[in-house]
Image (cartoon, rainbow, N blue to C red):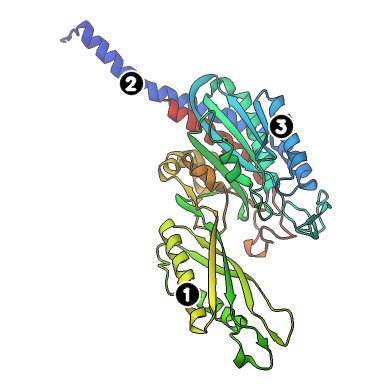
Amino acid sequence: MTFSLLSRPALRAAALGLGALLGPLAATAQNAALDARIAKLAAAEEAKVIAWRRDLHEHPELGNEENRTAALVAAHLKSLGFEVTTGVARTGVVGILRGGKPGPVVALRADMDALPVTEAPGLAYASTVKTTYLGQPVGVMHACGHDTHVAMLMGAAEVLAQVKKDLPGTVKFIFQPAEEGSVPGVEGGAKLMVKEGVMENPKVDAVFGLHINAATEVGNLRYRPEGFYAAADVVQIVVKGKSAHGAAPWTSVDPVVVAAQIVLGLQTVVSRQTELTKAAAVVTVGKIDGGVRNNIIAEQVTMIGTIRTLDKGMQQKIWADVRRTAEGIAASAGATAEVSITPQVPVTYNDPHLTAQMLPTLRAVAGPDHVQLKEATTGAEDFSYYAEKAPGLFVNLGGLAKGTDPAQVPSHHTAGFKIDESGLALGVKTLATLAADYLAQKHH
């Protein structure tokens, strides 16, 4: 038997090579152990998270009015020892948890506002809150699940606080007001949070968020790289014609008829002028206002609507197509059409590299068979503003009771909207594990 003696430099090199091999293995084992602790802690939070959610559901607040909600969140974060800032973008709350080791910064976001919807009876903790919105008396209801988002992020904060010493980096918790939008002329939501520096000091390296979905069965997560939710733009078209007596229409340029033709013409922007194999798009006219009397042809008609796109190039093309179509139709009748388009919310864009990086985490927390690639959605979400400042990943969490037909469930933003609370523990585990795994991966 022959032995080969290695020199000291060779031994050192061999040792370094072995260390390089064992290092990632040890790190992976540490991550797995931490993730297992997080899963156990998240399960233990379930009853507390459900209780928070029910309290928030019974006491909903509209955008920029989330004072009670913000106070509840701030008190909870302070009790955990976080650095807490209140009054961000009016009623927003930001908490900072600094881990036991140096590393990057990851942000987790939840939205806090409710909607001007009167809740259908049936729940023991149903909202009976009433208010006035844009001059109209309305009920207030968490009809989109933001109460669950707040409760789950509060739970994730408590979980991560208990593993603080093992976190190689910092977690920033963003509790945001007014995701559903502010009243006209009032800035708010994620756009104002970003404007006031929520993604800085410390600078965020990646941001995660989730939205509960009433049509996705509990226990499931749904993701999509690139365009997840659509950009939403407000379009206003003012058609100006010539007023006349309703009995003599030939002496007028009737803006009501022109407006009707424009509505029909706009349907061709999507159906005949847009490359729908590339991405979905929507042009919808939601309101038409013109005239005051049955026998007077109006001088002017105003239309407002929404444009939804998932691709920035298509967005610019559709804007141009809407202008050309409206202006051309109006000109053909001797009228004019003034078109104004106001960007409201950008595309919610999931960074492809970050999505691929964190997909194993999603599969680990929910199980490989419970993580599905979803189709793009033409709804909008102002999480997009955070994802413009740092790579972002936004996912859907199941909130539909098992065995229920999704087609028979009331949709989001309606009086009958309901969530199965058995899915909330998975949301807590998902948020906490995404943060921990991202920090660990970047650290190593």
Query: Of the residues tagged 2 and 1, which is closer to the observer?
Result: 1
Which residue carries the number 1 mark? 325
Local SS, label 1: helix
Which numbered disc, 3 or 1, marks the residue closer to the eye? Answer: 1
Q: In this orientation, which residue lies closer to the viewer: 271 or 420?
A: 271
**Image point (42%, 43%), residue name:** 356
Q: Which residue is mark 3?
A: 74
Of 77 and 180, nearer the camera is 180
Q: Position of residue 319 (x, y in %)?
A: 47, 64
**Disc 3 to disc 1, C-alpha distance:** 50 Å
Crowding near the residue tagged with mark 1, few <14, some 14–19, many ≥20 C-alpha atoms within 10 Å: some
Which disc is residue 259 wearing?
none
Mark 3 near mark 1, Cβ–Cβ under 8 Å?
A: no
3 or 2: tag closer to the N-terminus: 2
Residue drawn at point x = 74 percent, y = 40 percent: 69
128 left or right, relative to 260:
right
Which residue occupies 50% across, 57% down?
376
Where's the N terminus, which quadrant?
A: top left
Query: Disc 3 to disc 2, how far (Cα)?
Result: 43 Å
Q: Which residue is mark 2?
A: 20
**Type of amino acid at the residue the image marks with label 2:** Ala
Q: Determine whether label 2 and label 1 are within 8 Å by CB.
A: no
**Which sits earlier in the primary sequence, circle 2 or circle 1?**
2
Amino acid, disc 3: Ala
Real-space Cα distance between discs 2 and 1? Answer: 63 Å
